[in-house]
Image (cartoon, grey):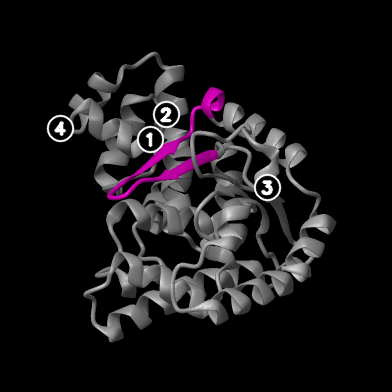
Amino acid sequence: MKAESAESNILGYSQGSPTVLRILLGTQLRRLRTEMGISREDAGYAIRASHAKISRLELGQVSFKERDVADLLTLYGVHDPAERAPLLELARQANAPGWWHKYGDLLPSWFEVYIGLEGAASVIRTYENQFMPGLLQSPSYARAVIRLAHERTPEEEIERRVKLRMTRQDRLVGDRPVKLWAVIDEAVVRRSPGGGPEVMREQIRHLLDMTARPNVTVQLMPFDRGGHAAAGGPFTILRFPERDLPDVVYMEQLTSALYLDKPAESEHYMQVMDRLSIQAESPAETRRFLEKL
């Protein structure tokens, strides 16, 4: 069955990420439901839940109860034990805590989802116009940015938040590092988040070191380019190695985030990202700009 091969393929890349396993399972369940012509309302009734709960399950935004998955598979006409087993096993593994579980007291639930996606992605493309992308921040820069949002937070908690951000950067190294392609506005390297000029000098040196990696591409959008395709603000596109997983567009807000996974939506943002990459300085010109800066 397709689901069985999907499970085995995704586990190799996801490093056991429960978030991506939930999305994979939700994608399979959504496909089965639509093939049977069953509404979200009827599916919700079968597991004593609302249509909104079915939507969240299919997007991988909430954990699965194995009993609910079993009931949905029955409703969708999947009765063969050999076909049910991989999906039920996926449900069990998707409920396991991720490496970031120990930072759960620091993380809002909407951002936990992103960390899981980031840990499972094979390609991340991002546009930022105010702060350096988290995967490219130096420790001192990250500390300054975190203090902006948590100015009354004890120093011990600040350091834990910095440690969390630095641990996320492990995705850029290893046997299967994520490919990161970032377009950053010139304001990102001009405006200091605090801590004095040495923080920005260290950050720019760190950025130059990161762009020397074969899996990291950075392009600068200079001020003199005027208006450009991403006038609406920063966003990130995550792509996964398993074809059953849709691209996900992530847009962070002050107290929440938007996750878009419909093909029409993600394709629109991918086109915007492509236009940004054409408008911005080339990676080589960006390195020369940073060295001069």
Q: How crowded is mark 2: few (under 14 residues within 10 Å), some or many (20 or more)?
A: many
Left or right: where does residue 268 sit relative to residue 40? right
Counting residues from the start of the chain, the first of labels 2 and 4 encountered is 2
Number of numbered discs visible in the structure rendering: 4
Residue hosting label 4: 48
**Which residue occupies 23% across, 26% down?**
51
Considering depth in this image, is 23 or 110 the residue closer to the camera?
Answer: 110
Amino acid at dot 3: Met
Residue 58 circle label: 1
Q: Which of marks 4 and 3 is nearer the N terminus?
A: 4
Report which residue position mark 2 lands on.
Answer: 30
Q: Looking at the picture, how far across and down is residue 127, in whole percent?
A: 58, 47
**Residue 68 shown left or right of residue 275 in the figure:** left
The answer to whether residue 1 is visible is no
The amino acid marked with disc number 2 is Arg
Q: Residue at x 41, y 58 (%)?
A: 93
Q: How far apart are marks 2 and 1 (CA)?
A: 6 Å
Check contact, mark 2 vs mark 1: CB within 8 A. yes
Question: What's the residue at 69%, 65% (across, down)?
Answer: 176
Image quarter hosting the C terminus: bottom right
Are the two marked residues, 3 and 1, in contact with CB atoms closer than 8 angstroms? no
Tag 1 secondary structure: helix
**Magenta residues, start to end:** 248-265
Task: Identify the mark nearer the N-term, 3 or 2.
Answer: 2
Check if mark 1's residue and mark 4's residue have beta carbons within 8 Å. no
The kind of secondary structure element at disc 4 is loop
Image position of 280 (left or right of 196): right
Q: Is residue 204 above or below residue 108?
A: below
Q: How far apart are marks 3 and 2 (CA)?
A: 39 Å
Task: Using the image, tell me which numbered label, if any, was put on residue 221.
Answer: 3
Check whether the beta carbons of the residues at disc 3 and disc 2 lie within 8 A of each other. Answer: no
